[in-house]
Image (cartoon, coloured by chain):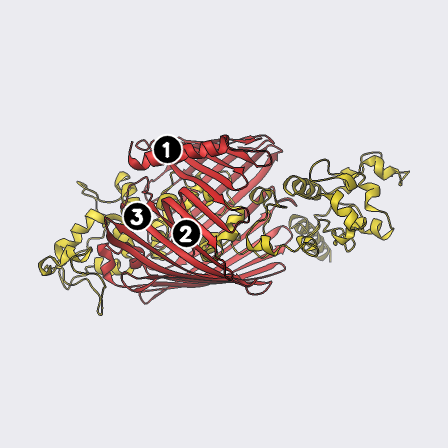
Chain colours: A red, B yellow
């Protein structure tokens, strides 16, 4: 057993103890859920186990474990975390395996600890995290450790703003170092604003900056977004490809959602991109029609066109969800993508799925499906899927 | 004339059908007239008998047919009144509220002196909105501390199960995948009010290399929000080229994440493989097309997805100082790193 596995196993045991032994009267119930997925193609099977509970008012725990995704992987834990907080929720500590994402610092899956506390002056909060980045199941770089933190301040009832910092090191060598800023909130009752940015300190320059504004009133919701991203700075600073300099990509766009009728929603998205002095465009229009007042049944149709650097394609997507019985749903999904340049990868890439879901008013759920597609990889492919789920709640 | 009449009839029929399909005709045929009863001065507890003793558990105290016929002594139909005059949606909402909210009608009715409309403000205006809005709670209860500390447990037992979404919430629209990171950066605690750690890890776990995408597990929910649904695998190269850096913003270990699949599926070169995914004019002498340099500048993460880590040696063969590949740095390039550090020392071997 590797050191990381042993650590995970020990933490998992802690969580089990916290969940099973610690509960007291009046605490939140212990929740467990298991999903088993089987596919005719390899990987042939997957089981996920999810547990959460709050044994004491000040102690909560959760875990998500999967097993048997690929022949050479026997299982792993995505989340094994214990969270303790003071009664007034002014401070919180977390230990275990979790995703650390303080502010605009990029989310990182770590084995470690984090803490957050409200400082005694003003509406200022401080948070810090540290640990060992979790390697993906497929391998990847072994960052020895990562640490960072964030200080934020509430801006009255409007929102909050913060500054974060993160660095990763491998055997003492600096891998990444990032400074991040974020701000966001509700400017008015109708308008939300949010911005975030990350600055690469190891090779100075902006790694990523994003802005978002959304306005909603009645049946309309209009949002605008702008994204500046430097792919070379998203790589580790020790990567040879980081020396190629900064060739950022920029993307600006907007989205309009309109409840055109009580059961009909229409969404339009338009975005323009600028990459290496080349302009691109991305357009999408889709509509969703609910088949009954509560939306148990629905059909949708969408059309997309992408024009961008040897990646032009047109796509059509249709979905359907039909309650055929109080306990059974029939769902279907169809997608057709047509690349402008096939380059030997096929002229049309269709994909379709038909599924039947059994969803009685009980802890059990099940679904079966048949999926078929053609892609650059497969001239024709078919697969069958089966998922069985069970939920428990105690007490 | 005859054609015009037929055409007009067709238009009327189609319009009527469309109106029904689009939901303009969704209300129950005879919704229960709450407003009319309020205006008549009928006390709420006359029909909702027992509500004055109800805490956060127990029956919903919805009126029965017997309650109705105690006043309407000669009903027009012998069947249960709720069959036509009840709204299943509103009943379901009331049941969900009873299950998920900690609220005691018993404790509140004495405070409002039996005037239910002080909280159920919509009842006096129309029959559409019967539920008391949260703003009605805030008229008496100052929840500043709870808002500040995201402590909703006093009333909302389990927000994620309850499924209540704040009216002004940005991130659960159709643009969730694109915009949630921007919004969550400054509002992580708001997200954590409802979502647990598992929600984030399902996508961000292990550099985005979770064993089964949420879309795969939820294959029977086609309307779910997800970046990787349906035929994504077929068009993922298009998506990646169209938005450089998009993939590596989540898949932060692209050097293995991409290569493993590409080698296994035989769509890319690997050790001992004769297959190359690059066009013939990808690498060449000075003055030739030599496309790889420009492609690498546009999206270096894409190159690193196969040639990262140990694969960087392939680049160094030509681009080391004094090599035939020339200087890969753009004009004006500078770095704070020392020559003995990675990656500088890979090429600057003679300058150490």
> From mark 2 to mark 1, how far is it between C-alphas?
24 Å
Disc with the residue nearer the chain's start (3 vs 1): 1
Q: Position of residue B219 (x, y in %)?
A: 47, 38
Outermost residue, right side: B73
- Dot 2 crowding, Cα within 10 Å, few <14, some 14–19, many 20+: many
Q: Mark 3 — on which chain does it sit? A: A
Q: Position of residue B107 (x, y in %)?
A: 74, 45
* Label 3 residue SS: strand
Give the residue drawn at x 27%, y 38%.
B264
Mark 2 touches mark 3? (CB < 8 Å): no
Looking at the rendering, which quadrant does residue A65 occupy?
Answer: top left
Looking at the rendering, which quadrant does residue A274 occupy?
Answer: bottom left
- Dot 1 crowding, Cα within 10 Å, few <14, some 14–19, many 20+: some
Give the residue drawn at x 27%, y 49%.
B305
* Label 1 residue SS: helix
Q: Position of residue A131 (x, y in %)?
A: 34, 46
Q: Position of residue B261 (x, y in %)?
A: 30, 41
The numbered dot on residue A145 is: 3
- Residues A167 and A244: in front is A167
> From mark 2 to mark 3, how far is it between C-alphas?
15 Å
Labels 3 and 1 within one chain: yes
Query: The C terminus of chain B lies in which quarter of the figure?
Result: bottom left
Labels 2 and 1 within one chain: yes
Looking at the rendering, which quadrant does residue B57 occupy?
Answer: top right
* Label 2 residue SS: loop
> From mark 3 to mark 1, how far is it between C-alphas?
20 Å
């Amino acid at each position: 057993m590797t050191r990381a596995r042993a650590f995970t196993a020990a933490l998992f045991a802690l969580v089990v103890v916290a969940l099973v032994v610690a509960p007291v009267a009046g605490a939140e119930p212990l929740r467990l859920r298991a999903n088993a997925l089987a596919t005719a193609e390899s990987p042939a099977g997957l089981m996920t186990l999810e547990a959460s509970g709050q044994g004491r008012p000040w102690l909560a725990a959760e875990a998500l474990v999967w097993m048997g995704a690929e022949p050479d992987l026997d299982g792993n834990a995505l989340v094994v975390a214990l969270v303790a907080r003071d009664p007034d929720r002014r401070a919180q500590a977390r230990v275990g395996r979790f995703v650390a994402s303080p502010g605009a610092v990029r989310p990182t899956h770590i084995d470690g600890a984090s803490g957050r506390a409200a400082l005694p002056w003003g509406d200022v909060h401080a948070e810090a995290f540290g640990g060992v980045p979790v390697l993906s199941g497929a391998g990847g770089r072994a960052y020895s450790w990562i640490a960072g933190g964030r200080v934020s301040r509430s801006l009255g009832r409007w929102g909050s703003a913060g500054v974060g910092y993160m660095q990763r090191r491998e055997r003492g060598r600096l891998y990444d170092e990032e400074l991040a800023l974020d701000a966001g909130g509700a400017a008015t009752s109708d308008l939300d604003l949010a911005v975030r940015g990350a600055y690469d300190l190891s090779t100075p320059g902006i790694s990523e900056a994003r802005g978002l504004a959304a306005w909603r009133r009645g049946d309309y919701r209009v949002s605008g977004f702008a994204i500046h991203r430097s792919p070379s700075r998203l790589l580790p600073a020790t990567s040879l490809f980081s020396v190629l300099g900064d060739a950022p990509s920029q993307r600006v766009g907007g989205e309009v959602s309109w409840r055109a009728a009580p059961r009909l929603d229409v969404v339009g998205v338009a975005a323009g991109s600028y990459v290496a002095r080349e302009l691109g465009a991305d357009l999408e229009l889709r509509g969703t029609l609910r088949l009954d007042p509560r939306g148990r049944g629905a059909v949708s149709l969408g059309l997309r066109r992408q024009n961008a650097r040897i990646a032009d394609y047109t796509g059509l997507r249709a979905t359907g969800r039909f309650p055929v019985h109080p306990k059974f749903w029939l769902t279907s999904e169809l997608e057709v993508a047509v690349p402008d340049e096939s380059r030997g990868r096929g002229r049309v890439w269709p994909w379709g799925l038909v599924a039947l879901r059994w969803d009685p008013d009980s802890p059990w759920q099940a679904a079966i499906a048949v999926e078929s597609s053609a892609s650059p990889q497969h001239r024709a492919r078919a697969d069958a899927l089966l998922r069985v789920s069970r939920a428990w709640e105690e007490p | 004339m005859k054609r015009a009449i037929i055409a007009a009839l067709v238009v009327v029929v189609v319009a009527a059908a469309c109106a029904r399909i689009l939901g303009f005709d969704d209300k129950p045929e005879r919704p229960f007239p709450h407003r009319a009863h309020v205006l008549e001065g009928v006390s709420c507890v006359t029909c909702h008998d027992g509500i004055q003793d109800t805490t956060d558990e127990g029956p919903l105290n919805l009126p029965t047919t017997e309650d109705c016929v105690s006043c309407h002594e000669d009903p027009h139909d012998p069947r249960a009144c709720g069959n036509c005059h009840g709204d299943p949606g509103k009943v379901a909402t009331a049941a969900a509220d009873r299950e998920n909210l900690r609220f005691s009608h018993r404790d509140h009715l004495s405070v409002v002196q039996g005037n239910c409309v002080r909280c159920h403000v919509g009842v006096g205006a129309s029959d559409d909105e019967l539920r008391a809005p949260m703003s009605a709670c805030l008229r008496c209860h100052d929840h500043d501390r709870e808002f500040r500390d995201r402590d909703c447990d006093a009333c909302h037992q389990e927000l994620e199960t309850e499924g209540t979404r704040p009216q002004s919430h940005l991130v659960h629209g159709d643009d969730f995948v694109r915009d949630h990171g921007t919004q969550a950066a400054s509002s992580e605690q708001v997200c954590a009010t409802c979502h647990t750690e598992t929600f984030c890890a399902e996508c961000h776990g292990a550099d985005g290399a979770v064993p089964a995408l949420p879309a795969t597990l939820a294959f029977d929910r086609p309307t779910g929000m997800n970046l990787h649904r349906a035929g994504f695998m077929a068009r993922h190269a298009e998506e990646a080229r169209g938005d450089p850096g998009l993939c590596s913003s989540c898949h932060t270990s692209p050097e293995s994440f991409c290569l493993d699949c590409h080698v296994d599926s035989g769509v890319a070169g690997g050790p001992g493989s004769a297959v190359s995914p690059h066009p013939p004019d990808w690498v060449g002498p000075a003055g030739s097309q030599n496309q790889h340099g420009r492609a690498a500048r546009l999206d270096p993460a894409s190159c690193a997805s196969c040639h990262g880590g140990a694969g960087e040696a392939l680049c160094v063969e030509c681009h080391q100082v004094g090599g035939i590949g020339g200087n890969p740095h753009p004009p004006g390039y500078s770095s704070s790193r020392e020559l003995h550090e990675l990656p500088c020392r890979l090429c600057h071997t003679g300058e150490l």
